[in-house]
Structures are given as C-alpha cells and as structure tokens.
Amino acid sequence: MKKLFLFVSLAIFGGILFSSCEKDDKVEPREKMIRPVNLKYYENDELLYEVNYEYNEAGQLTREVWDEDEYDLYEYNADGNVIKHTMHYDSGSDYETFEYEGDRIVRMNEFYDNSEQDYYSLYKYNDEGYVSEITCYEMDDSFYEKMTFKYDEKGNVTESILNEPDPVTGEYNPEIYMKRTYTYDDKHHIFKNVGYPFTYKSYVNNIIEEKYHEYDGYTHYSDIDEYSYTYNEDGYPTERIDTYMRDVIEYKEL
C-alpha cells in the first residue's frame, strides 16, 4: 500500500489581541501564521528536487507542485477540513477522500491508478482526542494493515506501530510489526500551520531522533535516524539535515 506522508493540526490565525478593559492591560502577541512556500532537497549539495506550496485566500493549502506533471491538490469542506487529496503524476493520478464526524476523521478512502476504490481506513481516538488507531481494509473487508499511536503532552506522536498481515495466515498478527519511536525539539514544526489531515504523523514539533525496529515474521531489523535544524527568529526550521539529505525551507506569513 502506498504510504502517504501527509500530516494534521491547524493553529489559530495570527495577529495581536488587544484588551481595553484596563489602562494597564498588557498586549499579548498571538502566534504568526507562517507557512512554507518552497522546500528544496539537496544531496551532497546537489539539488535533487523542490516543492512549491500554494494557498488560497483563507490560508488553506491548495497545491503542492513537484514538477509540471507532478502535483497534489487539496479540497475542503465548509468547516475547513480536507475532504479530498489528489496526487497527479505524468502517468495518471491517485486520490484519497476523508469523512468526518465534527472535525474528527472517521474514515479515509483510497483510490489508485484512476481505478475504483482499493482500500478504506477506519479511525479511533483516545480520551485526549488524538488518533489512537487506524485500521486499513481491502474492499472485501479483509485486513490490510493497522497503525497504533502514542503521544506526549504536546500532541507529538512518540510511538507508532504498524502491523501487517501474517505472511502465513494473512490475518492480523501483533507479532508482525514495524515500530518507530520519536524524540522532538521544542520548536515549531515545518508544516505546523499547513493543516494536513492526520494519516500517520504529527506536526507540532520537529523530529530529532527516529528509532526503528521491524520484524516481518522472519528477520529483526533496527536502525536510528537523527536530524538537526537551523531555525529562523520565529522558531521554524530553515534547514534540516540528516545522514543523506539537506532540506532548505522558505516561509511566508499568510
């Protein structure tokens, strides 16, 4: 199944809130609505590709442009929630739709290669209102995969576990897993104000360490990825570096 690295959390609109109740009331600045408009990916100082982000007048992301024939489109409902995400390629397009109860996603539908629906996913939430479980099924209702999540007090995903079908029975097996644990900085996430729907990761703070442990029923595999950042005066990363890549991010206040 194609993994969509997409994300979810809208912040309040920026500005300054004034109170005229008392002469000595303090002016409290509200968080700026800063969003990425360009992201460049480098390997060994060679530009591999870049992504441009376009927004509507309401500040909602409408297009991610990777190339002339490769771009993503986002559509919203009246409440400002993403209801459709379409991925265009030179060879065709895939898309996913989201169904809500209030502001909570309860179901995601996935369509690939301009075909009929291939998969659907059902969402569950914990007592704090965060997504705790996403279970994906094929259209005959057979199990495809399941993800579970744990969070810190800020809403960052600290652990995710992906369970895939048992290689013998084809059924859900908690012993077949891909586990990731995350450590974060205390700065704003690059995509904090973009409003991606939650599919498997959070967009509060930035990951500085990601640990992997996988077991496919035959072999165990572990690894660690580390990330470092340079930040602007507003606390957003302008550069992200890992073992192989360097990303440069440009923002705009919208």
Image: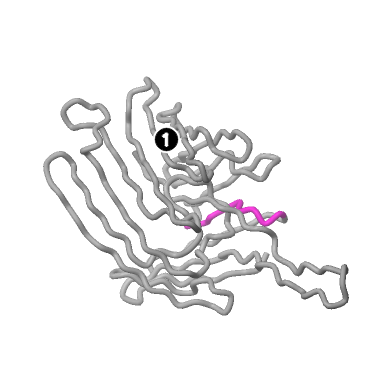
Is 104 displayed left or right of 172 in the figure? right
User: Does 14 appear in magenta?
Assistant: no
Q: Judging from the image, what secondary structure is the residue with disc 1 in? A: loop
Residue furthest toward the left?
218
- Residue at horizontal 33 percent and vertical 71 percent from the top: 43
Amino acid type of the residue that numbered disc 1 sits on in the rendered structure: Tyr
Is 72 displayed left or right of 44 in the figure? right
Most foreground residue, 105 or 113: 105
Most foreground residue, 251 or 198: 198
- Residue at horizontal 32 percent and vertical 61 percent from the top: 210
**Residue 67 visible to the viewer:** no
In which quadrant is the N terminus drawn?
top left
- What kind of secondary structure does the magenta stretch mostly adopt? strand
How many circles with numbers are drawn on the protein?
Answer: 1
**Residue 73 visible to the viewer:** yes
Establish if 201 lies above or below 2.
below
Q: Badge 1: how crowded within 10 Å, few (<14), some, or many (20+)?
A: some
In which quadrant is the C terminus drawn?
bottom right
Horizontal and vertical percent position of residue 36: 56, 65
Horizontal and vertical percent position of residue 164: 27, 36
User: Does 60 appear in magenta?
Assistant: yes
Is 214 displayed left or right of 137 in the figure? left
Give, as a single range, the part of the protein colored magenta.
58-67
Establish if 13 lies above or below 170.
below
Horizontal and vertical percent position of residue 16: 76, 69
Establish if 183 lies above or below 114.
below
- Residue at horizontal 36 percent and vertical 41 percent from the top: 147
The residue that mark 1 highlights is 112
